[in-house]
Image (cartoon, rainbow, N blue to C red):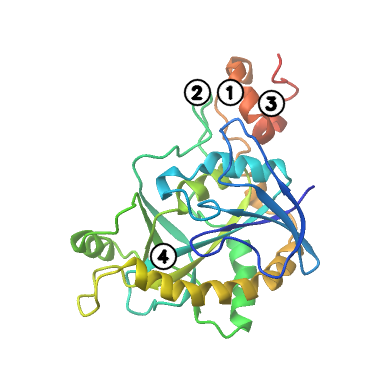
Amino acid sequence: MKARIAVIGGSGVYQLSGARLIEKIDVPTPFGMPSDLITVAEVGKQTVAFLPRHGKGHRLLPTEVPARANIWALKSLGVEQILSISAVGSLREQFRPGDFILCDQLIDRTRNRELSFFGDGLVAHVPFAAPFCPGMSEVIGGILEKGKHPFHDRGTLVTMEGPLFSTRAESNLYRSWDADLIGMTALPEVKLAREAEMCLAGIAMVTDYDCWRESEESVSVEMILKVMRGNTKAVQQLIPSIAAALSARGECACHRAAENTLVTDPALIPYETRRKLWLLYGKYWKGASPQE
């Protein structure tokens, strides 16, 4: 079963509400198993693939999310556009708990993650100046603008390692960098989607003010879960309209992101690397099949 649109659900978003189940697929990949079974469902009139980032029941730490397997698996199902949903903390007064943000920039503070499909005998340098797909974000922004839920059409997101929350010194440091939000899961997911030539845009759902705002009590899981329930209900109601709008999009520069960026001579790429990445880059290797 093929699906051109996928939703990766973050904290609190573990399924698609009101969708008609078509099938659940177990997708082995060269990078291990994805976070969970991929659900293919009919959302409105669109076929959508859904993957819970942390697994059903929220079993995976941010560092443990198998992002390479997740992106490869969605690519194998024909996915071209990914709506990434995540819970974040706010570093700015104007980004209030409950608000939605369409992030446009990232700062990487992760340390212990597989950040790329490249390596193991294959070198490439894919542009990443605009990490989230601008065209996809514009379409989603149009849907959010028609609704009543408060949202912001841009924001810079710091991705930290976790699973602990920030110290106050770290929170204030990120504020001094002009960052707006902090989360634990956008990277390497966004990088890998770009390398895999897939559009990705993210709805970041604010749950708290991190710990910089000394007039507020420090962030806690209880506080986050309370706000998250409202956020989850609101975003679930938006997904059918977003899926319908995204289905009307045509070709995008994201779908050619790796073109002319692969540096290594295909004849010198190790067999195992070619085998793993044939799904992603075989079209650029001019008939050099993974068996050669």
**CB atoms of marks 1 and 2 within 8 Å:** yes
Query: What is the crowding at mark 2: few (fewer than 14 residues within 10 Å), some, or many (at least 20)?
Result: few
Q: Position of residue 176 (x, y in %)?
A: 24, 64
Disc 3 or 2, which lies upstream in sequence? 2
Query: What is the crowding at mark 3: few (fewer than 14 residues within 10 Å), some, or many (at least 20)?
Result: some
Badge 3 is on which residue? 285
Label 3 vs label 2, nearer the camera: 2
Disc 1 or 2, which lies upstream in sequence? 2
Badge 4 is on which residue? 88
Looking at the image, is 145 positioned above or below residue 122? below
159 and 22: which is toward the camera: 22
Label 4 vs label 1, nearer the camera: 4
Q: Residue at x 62, y 34 (%)?
A: 29
112 and 252: which is toward the camera: 112
Q: Say which element carries label 2.
A: loop
Q: Residue at x 63, y 83 (%)?
A: 146
Q: Quadrant of residue 85?
A: bottom right
Q: Which mark is residue 120?
A: 2
Badge 1 is on which residue? 273
In-image side of 281 versus 85 (left or right): right
Q: Quadrant of residue 64?
A: top left
Q: Say which element carries label 1.
A: helix
Question: Residues under labels 1 and 2: Cα distance?
Answer: 6 Å
Question: Residues under labels 3 and 2: Cα distance?
Answer: 17 Å
Name the amino acid type tagged 4: Val
Disc 4 or 2, which lies upstream in sequence? 4
In-image side of 253 versus 53 (left or right): right
Q: Residue at x 46, y 77 (%)?
A: 99
